[in-house]
């Protein structure tokens, strides 16, 4: 019977791809957009409309940036207050500067969409650990247990020890 394992490199590459998911929502602005320096002006209320036509009031920092002779406003992530006067980088569409995005960690990763990469990372980690355990048992390293048995010996074979060893292997 042929058994498969997932290498550490494959695990790391898939993790990086999952972590890049929030960037994929703004890829056009990041690749084709222009950069401008913006300054945080104020923390103002923003009405957020939901799919069921209900509305909620949130707050977001307003960032002002200049393109040519015009001044445009970009909005930071909702619920996160940037310090007034802080300088941030804004990416904007050269054809329509009204389409813009702030390039900060909080603007890219702290949103409602960030739950998806977190869930995918947990599922991928569980798959990686369980798949590699199955293949170890199937290869016969534990002759007292049937193939695919969840039973592990005490000590170095415990889940936390194996997890720690796999995570520290990439240093």
Image: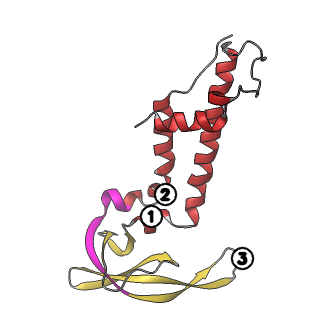
Q: CA distance from mark 2 to mark 3?
A: 25 Å
The image shows residue 148 at horizontal and vertical percentages of: 75, 22
Residue 134 position (above or below residue 88): above
Is residue 76 shown left or right of residue 140?
Answer: left
Magenta-span inclusion, residue 31: yes
Residue 87 position (above or below residue 158): below
Q: CA distance from mark 1 to mark 2?
A: 6 Å
Q: For residue 144, which numbered disc appears in the image?
A: none
Give the quarter of the figure containing the N terminus.
top right
| Label 2 or label 3, whichever comes before in sequence order | 2
Q: Residues within 10 Å of mark 1 (few under 14, many from 20)?
A: many
Q: Which residue is mark 1?
A: 108
Give the quarter of the figure containing the C terminus.
top left
Nearer to us: label 2 or label 3: 2
Helix, strand or loop at label 3? It is loop
| Label 1 or label 2, whichever comes before in sequence order | 2
Helix, strand or loop at label 2? It is helix
The image shows residue 84 at horizontal and vertical percentages of: 35, 86
Where is residue 145, by image quadrant?
top right
Q: Residue at x 46, y 44 (%)?
A: 16
| Label 3 or label 1, whichever comes before in sequence order | 3
The span shown in magenta is: 29-41
Q: For residue 52, which numbered disc appears in the image?
A: 3
Q: For residue 22, which numbered disc appears in the image?
A: 2
Q: Residue at x 45, y 68 (%)?
A: 106
């Amino acid at each position: 019977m042929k058994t498969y394992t997932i290498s550490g490199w494959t695990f790391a590459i898939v993790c990086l791809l999952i972590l890049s998911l929030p960037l994929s929502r703004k890829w056009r602005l990041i690749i084709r957009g222009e950069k401008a320096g913006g300054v945080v002006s104020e923390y103002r209320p923003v009405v957020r409309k939901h799919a069921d036509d209900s509305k909620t009031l949130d707050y977001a920092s307003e960032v002002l940036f200049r393109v040519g002779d015009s001044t445009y406003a970009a909005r930071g992530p909702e619920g996160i207050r940037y310090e007034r006067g802080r300088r941030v980088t804004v990416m904007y569409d050269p054809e329509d500067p009204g389409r813009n995005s702030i390039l900060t960690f909080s603007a890219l990763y702290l949103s409602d969409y960030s739950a998806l990469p977190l869930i995918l990372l947990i599922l991928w980690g569980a798959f990686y650990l369980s798949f590699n355990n199955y293949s170890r048992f199937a290869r016969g390293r534990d002759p007292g247990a049937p193939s695919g048995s969840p039973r592990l010996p005490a000590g170095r074979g415990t889940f936390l020890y194996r997890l720690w060893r796999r995570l520290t292997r990439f240093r």
